Amino acid sequence: TLTILVIAILSIRYGYGKWEMLDTMCTIGAVITIALWIIFRDPMVVLIASIITDAFGCIPTIKKVWEDPTSESRIAWGWTVVACVLNFGAVIVWNSASVLYLSYLLGVNVVITYGIWYARPKILREANSV
């Protein structure tokens, strides 16, 4: 949680500096997730709500990667994917929550990393060769 708070503060300071509808949706999603935890006290409900909120929060990064792939570090995102894969080996107790969360993290990070390393740069190269 502290890491996410630091990233949020740094993104406000060093990011593109625009508050958009998606930012509002993500904030509302976070509040709803907290409310679900208070109401249901069911970790799986909260995990699913958190994943949905986080997925919406990833949309600006995915969009930014496709518009400007140089805005993100290839090495940092590459290592993030490696870390996600290694997380599977660190799980001691396998259950639906651990599989769901680790699979989500790997999936979203692969999508972003693919955009940085392969998809968008390939599109840019093809556009410049025409």
Image (cartoon, rainbow, N blue to C red):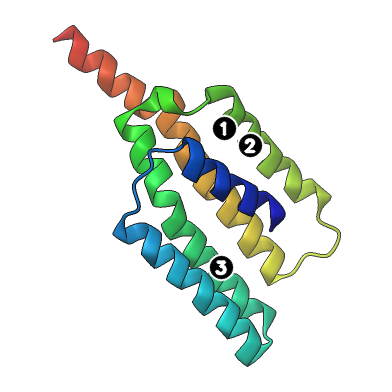
Q: Horizontal and vertical percent for residue 70?
A: 41, 22
The mark that comes first in sequence, 2 or 3, is 3
Residue at the disc numbered 1: 77
Q: Quadrant of the N terminus?
A: bottom right
Residue at 59% x, 45% y is 7
Q: Quadrant of residue 35?
A: bottom right
Of helix, strand and loop, which one carries label 3? helix
Residue at the disc numbered 3: 50
Give the answer, above or below, for where 43 lies relative to 126. Answer: below
Of helix, strand and loop, which one carries label 2? helix
Contact check, label 2 and label 1, Cβ < 8 Å? yes
Residue at 49% x, 33% y is 113
- CA distance separating discs 2 and 3: 19 Å
Of helix, strand and loop, which one carries label 1? helix
Q: Quadrant of residue 86?
A: top right
Answer left or right for 123 relative to 11: left
Q: Residues within 10 Å of mark 3 (few under 14, many from 20)?
A: some
Residue at the disc numbered 2: 80
- CA distance separating discs 3 and 1: 21 Å
Q: Horizontal and vertical percent for residue 6?
A: 64, 47
Q: Horizontal and vertical percent for residue 103?
A: 60, 55
Q: Residues within 10 Å of mark 1 (few under 14, many from 20)?
A: some
Q: Residues within 10 Å of mark 2 (few under 14, many from 20)?
A: some
Residue at 82% x, 49% y is 90
- CA distance separating discs 2 and 1: 5 Å
Total number of numbered discs in the rendering: 3
Q: Horizontal and vertical percent for residue 48?
A: 56, 72
Check the image and name the residue furthest to the bottom: 39
